[in-house]
Amino acid sequence: MPIVRQSVSVLVCAVTSVYGLVTVNLERYVAIVYHYRYRVLFTKRNKYLIIASCWMIGVFVQSHNLFLYGEDESSMCKFWGWPNKGVRVVAGCINFLVPFLLPFIFMIMVQWKGISTLKRQIELLHIKMGETELQHYVFLILCKYKLNPQRIN
């Protein structure tokens, strides 16, 4: 495989991995916040579509590198250059925002919302149940998932 295509395939895999993490975060968010709609939204078909879209985003975001680099006999990899400075700036912003910054911000927001929803649900359970009954319930959950109840305070 030529070195340029190999490098682009590594970049595509990196972006796909980032969007795979976004997908996992989104799936957990829906399971926590919209638990009644989870089975409707995350059907087997939709899961395959989500995985395919992660790969399509990765290919789309990194495909411009195939047009920027080429190969020659002397240096093997040659940078062809940008048409002008404006294109370089736009491509640089897109290359930073789409594969890294936007997914990072999205994952932080989703985690924040999921954690705040879980805290609210625990507070509601605490109000509904007595203190000892809630502690017993949490203890059973921790034992079920083989977590050490002594370490959790």
Image (cartoon, rainbow, N blue to C red):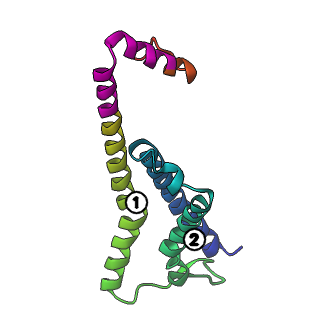
Please identify the quadrant where the C terminus is shown: top left
Distance CA(mark 1)–CA(mark 2): 16 Å
Residue 10 percent across, percent down from the top left: 59, 64
Badge count = 2
Q: In the image, what residue occupies the spot 30% across and 84% down?
A: 86
Q: Earlier in the sequence, mark 1 or mark 2?
A: 2
Kind of residue indicated by mark 2: Val
According to the picture, the residue beneath numbered tag 1 turns out to be 100
Q: Which mark is residue 8?
A: 2
Q: Secondary structure at mark 2?
A: helix
Give the camera-side residue of 57 and 77: 57
Q: Is residue 106 visible?
A: yes
In the rendered image, which quarter is residue 99 located in? bottom left
Q: Specify the principal SS of the magenta part.
A: helix
Q: Amino acid at mark 1?
A: Phe
For the view shown, which residue lies furthest in the right direction? 1
Residue 50 screen position, x and y as percent? 54, 62
What residue lies at 51% left-to-right and 75% top-to-bottom? Answer: 60
| Occupied quadrant, residue 83 | bottom left
Discs 1/2, front: 1
Is residue 130 one of those drawn in magenta?
Answer: yes
Reply above or below: 63 against 53. below
